[in-house]
Amino acid sequence: MSTAPTEHRLLDGTTLPAIGFGTYPLQGEECVAAVQSAIEAGYRLIDTAVNYGNEREVGEAIRRSGVPREELVVTSKLPGRAHAYDDAVASVRGSLDALGLDRIDLHLIHWPNPRVGLYVEAYRALVDLRAEGLVGSVGVSNFTEEHLTRVVEATGVTPVVNQVELHPWFPQVEMRAVHDRLGIRTESWSPLGKRQAPFTEAPVVAAAERHGVTPGQVVLRWQLQLGNVPIPKSATPERQRQNLDLFGFELSEAEVAAITGLGRADGRLFDGDPETHEEM
Ligand SMILES: NC(=O)C1=CN([C@@H]2O[C@H](COP(=O)(O)OP(=O)(O)OC[C@H]3O[C@@H](n4cnc5c(N)ncnc54)[C@H](OP(=O)(O)O)[C@@H]3O)[C@@H](O)[C@H]2O)C=CC1
Ligand SMILES: O=C(O)C(=O)[C@@H](O)[C@H](O)C(=O)CO
């Protein structure tokens, strides 16, 4: 039935599950329990960040899950305050320590922080850490075409993913075309639209009724059919399972286009323009 792949081959030869689990803003025991139940439900890509303050909990959930380490793709992210080369190396070592792992499978630069002006240096550090084996794959988040071009020109290494805000209000048509041209896999953050989810919008409701699924499943299936890797967060085991159950139906081209058509120029969920947003 399904035409969407369950995993993607990345530029560096590694594979990425077609859907992952987001962990912001989970904290403490709630985070451990949520990540553990997500792994139990079948998620194999887990998304955390230094700035989420929950890498320890994510590591604990991985250990409690009993799932073999090599089956999981653990992603973390370098914060803006650690873009200087030595700070980037120290930050990744800190993430490894907090997670209790000897390798982070995919490490991203969280935001380009253009006013700091050091994201190329940070990227170089991640490339060197990959050579040392402490990082499996190098990626970025919230990068524009210009930021991508600069790191590729400086290092000769293309990031395997760019994790960007992407949901029906903000479908990132131009950035997805840039990624396709460069061979970069698009990861979608806030893939459901978070608290402003478009669950009552006509194209989403109509597709949900037609296929006998929930609006959330329609939005996530739309993500898969565009080739994006969504990383929905849910603290609820039932929703975690529902968000993975996407391979028994297929949206028509017209349904996909109608959902993409919900996009609008001011569709960002908050003031997260990578050219100006500074997140340290
Ligand atoms: N790189 C970056 O700059 C950023 C990365 N991220 C990453 O992306 C992840 C996901 O984004 P996030 O902002 O959490 O937004 P999401 O779009 O994943 O939405 C999460 C919200 O939707 C609810 N929800 C989940 N599943 C369903 C469902 N099936 N039906 C109805 N409601 C549902 C959740 O509630 P409940 O928990 O109660 O189920 C939660 O309130 C983050 O956790 C983080 O890992 C996020 C922002 C920026
Ligand atoms: O969650 C993340 O990864 C972020 O980058 C934050 O910007 C987060 O989305 C936030 O704090 C929104 O207000």
Image (spheres, rainbow, N blue to C red):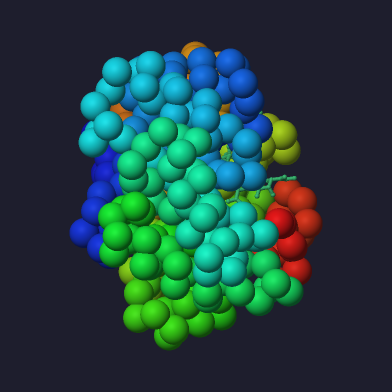
Horizontal side, residue 29 vs residue 217: left or right: right
Q: Position of residue 125 (x, y in %)?
A: 45, 67
Residue at image location 52% in from the left, 26% down from the top = 57
In depth, the one of 230 and 279 nearer the eye is 279
- Quarter of the picture containing the N terminus is top left
x, y percentage for residue 231? 49, 40
Quadrant containing the C terminus in the rendered view: bottom right
Q: Residue at x 28, y 55 (%)?
A: 133
Q: Is residue 50 above or below residue 110?
A: above
Number of marks in the image?
0
User: In the image, what residue occupies the spot 53% across and 61% down?
Assistant: 88
Is the residue 59 above or below the residue 193 in the image? Answer: above
Evaluate whether residue 234 shows in this view: yes
| Looking at the image, residue 3 lies above or below residue 88 | above
Q: Is residue 180 visible?
A: no
Say left or right for 257 vs 245.
right
Q: Nearer the viewer, residue 21 or 242?
A: 21
- 221 lies left or right of 262: left
Which one is in front, 221 or 279? 279
Left or right of residue 184, residue 213 in this image = right
At 45% across and 23% down in the image, what residue appears? 60
> Quadrant of the rendered structure where residue 278 is?
bottom right
Q: Position of residue 214 (x, y in %)?
A: 52, 24
Given the current orientation, which residue lies at the most extreme bottom position? 153
The quarter of the displayed image where residue 51 is located = top right
